Image: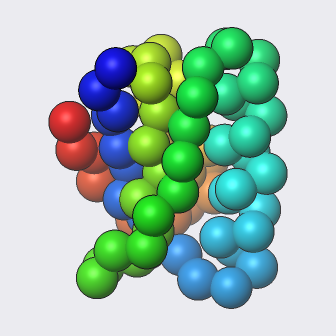
Amino acid sequence: MSYRCVVVRAYGQQVDRLRAEAYRISHDAKVDWCAERRELGTAFCFESPEARATFCAVCARENLQYQTED
């Protein structure tokens, strides 16, 4: 299964909150996810494009800079 990632420029407590959101989103969608440190922030990777889109909406709502990767 390939992962679809969202790289977010967030640090500290913001990353902790995003990890909680990623867990909730993946649990609800019944898909796997992971988080990886990257040079430009943290990559949150999901097995489904729908879960990634939901996570992008959370980032937009929180006014966080992000970019997507396949």
Q: Is residue 7 above or below residue 27?
A: below
Which residue is at a point 69% across and 73% down the rendered structure image?
A: 14
Residue 1 at x, y percent in the picture: 34, 20
Nearer to the camera, 36 or 50: 36
Residue 52 at x, y percent in the picture: 46, 31
Residue 33 position by quadrant: top right
Residue 8 at x, y percent in the picture: 43, 64
Nearer to the camera, 60 or 54: 54
Q: Residue at the front extreme?
A: 1
Q: Is residue 35 above or below residue 11?
A: above
Which residue is at a point 77% across and 62% down the rendered structure image?
A: 17
Q: Quadrant of the C terminus?
A: top left
Q: Is residue 38 left or right of residue 42?
A: left
* Residue 54 seen in the current view: no
The mark tally for this picture is: 0
Residue 57 position by quadrant: top right
Residue 59 at x, y percent in the picture: 55, 51
Describe the colour scheme in one phrase.
rainbow
Q: Residue at the left extreme?
A: 70
Q: Is residue 37 above or below residue 68?
A: below
Which residue is at a point 58% across and 28% down the rendered structure image?
A: 32
Which residue is at a point 75% across and 68% down the rendered structure image?
A: 16
Q: Is residue 63 left or right of residue 20?
A: left
Q: Is residue 28 left or right of residue 8?
A: right
* Residue 18 seen in the current view: yes
